[in-house]
Amino acid sequence: MEEARNVSMGKSSRPRPGEATELAESAWVIVLFCVACGAVAGALLPVLARWLLTLPWAPLEGPAELLTSVPEPALTLGTIAVGVLGGLLLGFTAVHESLSVGVSGTQVTLAIRDGSRAFTRQEISVLFRDGKQLVLLGPDGRELAREHCGLPWRRLAAALAEHGYEWAEEDPYRAAFRRWVPGTPGLPPGADALLRARAQARKHEDDAKDARELRGELLRLGVVVRDEEKRQYWRLVRGD
């Protein structure tokens, strides 16, 4: 589900000076995949409802009886239609949340959620993959960006290398992280309270925006945060 092209089309496979490489997931592929999944789920829903009614005790028995009371083929056609609409909504949301990356000899541009951010070559020290996230670090170890990335990692790493950026297979500062627990010593004033608030925000998917904003507040204090499941790990920016 990825598209890649050079802005200036040349005969050489390597980019020329001033040429940029753009990598993005195909919007059509994402939407069609979600629609197909929604249609399959809709087609299976009546089957699942009938199966639930055969059990001695089943959750959602009332809704299942109501659903199966609709005659065929209207029932299956209706659930498929609802599944397709749900898949469309999910697909458009996934496209909105998908990351596209533009790489040139002078900057790296990240575009996501109706916005984009550009980082100059001088600002970027290294880029690496952390799970499903793309991370950019500055020369002082400060985290410039961390975004979920669905692009093929090998293709992305190759594009960055072609333009002369350093790619690391893992976080070069990984050994410097310490697990956060309330009251951890060594944090700047105010950082512990922000980590407490972020731990609460991460418990609820609806608060994902708050968790991102709190990460930004911690970075302003010189604290870099890395997540592992429900745990938070932290390190200080060099010089802080």
Image: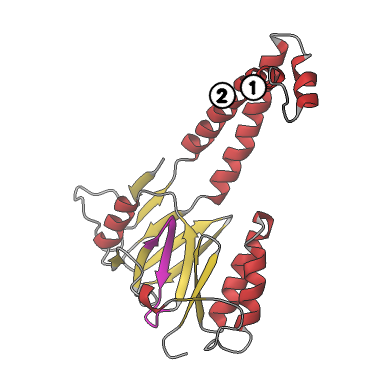
Q: Whole-percent x and y of residue 23?
A: 39, 51
Depth check: give the residue in front, 38 or 27: 38
| Residue at 66% from the left image edge and 64% from the top image edge | 201
Residue indicated by mark 2: 40
Residue indicated by mark 1: 48
Residue that extends furthest to the top in the rendered view of this protein: 72
Q: Whole-percent x and y of residue 113?
A: 58, 55
Tell me where residue 77 sits by quadrant: top right
Is 240 on the left-hand or right-hand side of 22? right
Q: Amino acid at mark 2?
A: Val
Q: Earlier in the sequence, mark 2 or mark 1?
A: 2
Residue range highlighted in magenta: 129-141
| Residue at 37% from the left image edge and 80% from the top image edge | 139
Cα–Cα span, label 2 and label 1: 12 Å
Q: Amino acid at mark 1?
A: Leu
| Residue at 50% from the left image edge and 40% from the top image edge | 27
SS at badge 1: helix
Depth check: give the residue in front, 69 or 111: 69
Q: Whole-percent x and y of residue 167?
A: 30, 65
